[in-house]
Amino acid sequence: MSALPIRSVADRLRPSYRAAFLGRQPEITAFHELLRPDSPHALLMVEGPAGIGKTALLARFADEARAAGRPVLRVDGRDGDEERAGTAGPGAPVVLVDDADRIPALEAWLIDRLLPRLPMDARVVLAARRSPVTRWSADPGWFQAIRPLPLGPLSRMDSSSLLHRFGVAPQLRREMIAFAGGNPSVLALAARTVQTSGRDGDGWVPTLELLDRVVEACAGPFPSGTHRRALQAAAQSIVITEDLLRAVVGDEAAAMFEWLRTQSFMHASPFGLLPNGAVRASVDAQLARRDPDGHRALHDRIRDYLFARARVAAGDAIMPAMVMLGYLHRRFGATAFYDRILGMPTGAPEDSATGPATSGVYEDAVDPAELPALLALSDEPEMVAFWFARQPSAFRAYRREDPIALLDIARAGPFHPLEPRARRGELIGFSALLRLGVEDVAACEHDPVLAAAWAYTHTAAPLTAGEELDVLRFVARPATGAPAAQRPAGERLADPLERRRAAAVQDLAVYRVLGRVVRADHPAWTFLATADPAPWAGALRYFDMPGTGLTVAGGGRDRHLFAHDWRAAPPAEWLAANSRRPVEELPPRAGTGLAVLTRAEFDTEVRSALRAWRRPERLADSPLLRTGLVRDADDPVEALRRTLASAVEALGRQSRTAKQHRVLTTTFLSGAPTQEAAARRLGLPFSTYRRHLTVGLSTLCDRLWLGAD
């Protein structure tokens, strides 16, 4: 028997069109339920942003309806032929209306024209970017008849499968999936750039032409440049609020927020609005590519606003502020806390089994009655009890609720780990961020880790009056089931959900540390003590916390100490310098703040400055100019020269250092061309001269070091 003849080009293309359809099983199931004779629903309302696959889904519905023996009538709201829908004829027809939001007075058309002309067992499916059926949602009669069906992004697995069908090489898919955010149309456009260029090497970057097409297709047209600017601000921020918009667009903030709220590509969260993944990625990348200076200026304006907000946040309000501030770092070396624990669709969505919000972890206060549970979670119970008795407010609990699968963020809303809970979930971890001053030295002697940290600061750069030491001393995370003391350092948690929970605990602890630093008037040292540095590698590198070289035994495991001295560049400067650069391009610590030198570095710089004392131009780059030696001097170079000369002169006022004074003066201040010449001027054997010089330099550095503090 010969195959049926192809009747049209559309018939010829239909098999390949079907082959490109992936996923959407829940939506297909909902359509099958709609077709059942006993279905309580007569109308299915498919809602989703541009490119998400509404038209393709209606085509699949048409195939399913025909397979069920139902006649199908398709109507496109863009064509103005909606009256055709009433001519579906007999036989329990299925009417599929695409772009329904383009039909003028849709609700009146449905009530007065379409539905009265359809038989009782007919079914209607409407597809629109944003549901136009508003009046009926409050009508008890229509409430049961209409079933809303929000259409979310494709899963990561389905996105990869679709790119495979488009012939995209595996090594290019990761970047495309992250860019498209589960939007099938954007995936197709991205795949076309590879097919057109013929390139299949490593890595993929969207072209400017692609960015322009995606922005206009998914978010355009823009009523004005201010509207575009508002969306650009939303693309850079984890969420956009009216007050944040005010920092960007001024008095038009209220109008712009209302416009964003009505767009199909925007979603609501408990803390503001956010764009979907494809719109966020394309709008942000387009601005960065077209106007790099404008992109940086917008970034800086948002950062400065959020930093100021975080500085004045009271109590636990610092945590949401740090989430928003930290999100600006999401592509620049900080770990992907923001995508993972907030469930925000900044990249491609995960499958429901590995979704970003399914950890269900949130931060909470510790109830004193929970101390036994904290001790059970730690491999250093004695130290936990010791510090809990002294600083109970330093401890934070991490709890989990039942996992929530974000199948559709527009429907469910993002899970937020910082929202207050009516009841407390299961305790799965805790952290302790200790704050220590000079009055705590005695207590630190009881804890080998804290004693080592305190000794390190004294050697490297001691605290000055009013400064304090912060130590993230404990971070207990979910384990594999074996007690923490029996789990080898670096062991990966086998359960993906447990890995996400462990990561969420770590990330929330980092937020707490950053909040402490941002709010401090004069932050000094921050330490991290961990037996397992591997999970912290990205954060340690980004936040410039090098290893101290100290390893302290505790709880049967070695604790490694990492440290950052914020006096080198205060937090505001650090954010400004680092927030737009990848880790490998981070500049060395510098700024208008004090340079923090180790004792060895300090001594080296003093010797270099003495050698350059008669050549002031060579002192212009000396790190000593940004130390306490010349604090607030109008002419730092001349102030440094005076400080060195005064310190040398002071040695001459004491008989026991008089010889050192003569040697240093002759060698450095009087301009002897060589050390041999200086020894001859002093009438000393060279070996005796060298001995006095070594002792003199050591004495001078000691006095300057103490004075620099």
Image: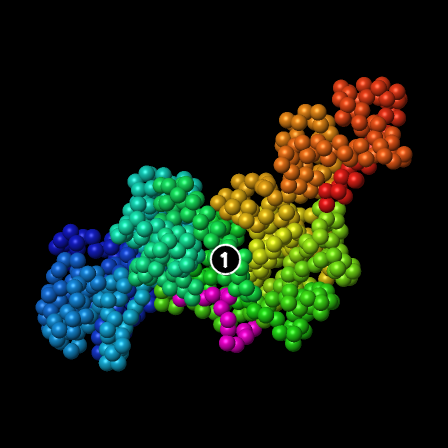
Going by the numbered disc 1, the residue's amino acid type is Arg
Q: Residue at x 24, y 63 (%)?
A: 128
In the depicted view, which residue is nearer to us: 77 or 482? Answer: 77
Residue 265: name its quadrant.
bottom left
Q: Is residue 328 magenta?
A: no
Q: Is residue 392 left or right of residue 114?
A: right
Considering only vertical position in the picture, is 661 above or below 269?
above
Residue 619: name its quadrant.
top right
Residue 286: % across, % down: 36, 45
Residue 668: % across, % down: 76, 26
Furthest-front residue in view?
634
Considering only vertical position in the picture, is 684 above or below 522?
above
Disc 1 crowd rating (10 Å Cα; few below 14, some 14-19, many 20+) is some
Q: Quadrant of the N terminus?
A: bottom left
Residue 520 seen by the camera: yes
Q: Which residue is mark 1?
A: 309
Q: Residue at x 78, y 60 (%)?
A: 442
What are the residue bounds of the magenta stretch? 413-426
Residue 485: % across, % down: 69, 63
